[in-house]
Image (tube, rainbow, N blue to C red):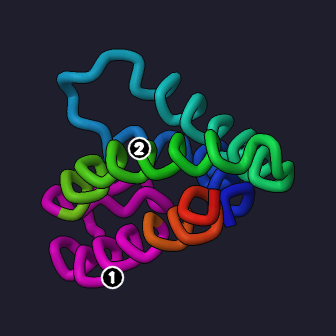
Amino acid sequence: MLCFTAIGHFKFSKGMQLMIPKIFPYRKALVLITGMMEIVAGIALLFPSLRYVTGIFLIVFFLLILPANIHAAIRKVDYQKNSFNGKGLGYLWFRVPFQIFLILWVWYFSVWPF
């Protein structure tokens, strides 16, 4: 899943930059770096010796990107079309529970058993 979602960081990088508040410099670099981080983390999960540390990293990562998703929903960002004509706050009804699910999933399969 992480490697799949990382593709969006490269394919829709201009639109994803709209998700990041303007107070942050180097938004394009942030989008590309987070995409690379998702790929590396997705691969690292395949190695038992890296799974625990990667799990902790991903939980923190998911918590840190949640404000960007909330910001994007408030601004109605459609990152695929690089516009402000997205679903808006209704998107959060899907995104926030999904983000919580991902955090719990990572915790259960990567952190808790160790």
Q: Residues within 10 Å of mark 1 (few under 14, many from 20)?
A: few
Residue at label 2? Answer: 60
Position of residue 55 relative to residue 57, above or below, is below
How many discs mark residues in the rendered view?
2
Quarter assignment of residue 75: bottom left
Give the left or right position of residue 103, taking residue 11 as reference.
Answer: left
At label 1, the amino acid type is: Phe
User: Which one is earlier in the sequence, the residue at label 1 or at label 2?
Assistant: 2
Q: What residue is shown at x 32% (from left), y 16% (from top)?
A: 25
* Residue 79 among magenta residues: yes
> Considering depth in this image, is 96 or 50 the residue closer to the camera?
50
Start-end of magenta stretch: 74-102
At label 2, the amino acid type is: Val
Q: What residue is shown at x 41% (from left), y 44% (from top)?
A: 60
Give the left or right position of residue 62, taking residue 1 as reference.
Answer: left
* Local SS, label 1: helix
Residue at label 1? Answer: 94
* Local SS, label 2: helix
Horizontal and vertical percent position of residue 15: 44, 48
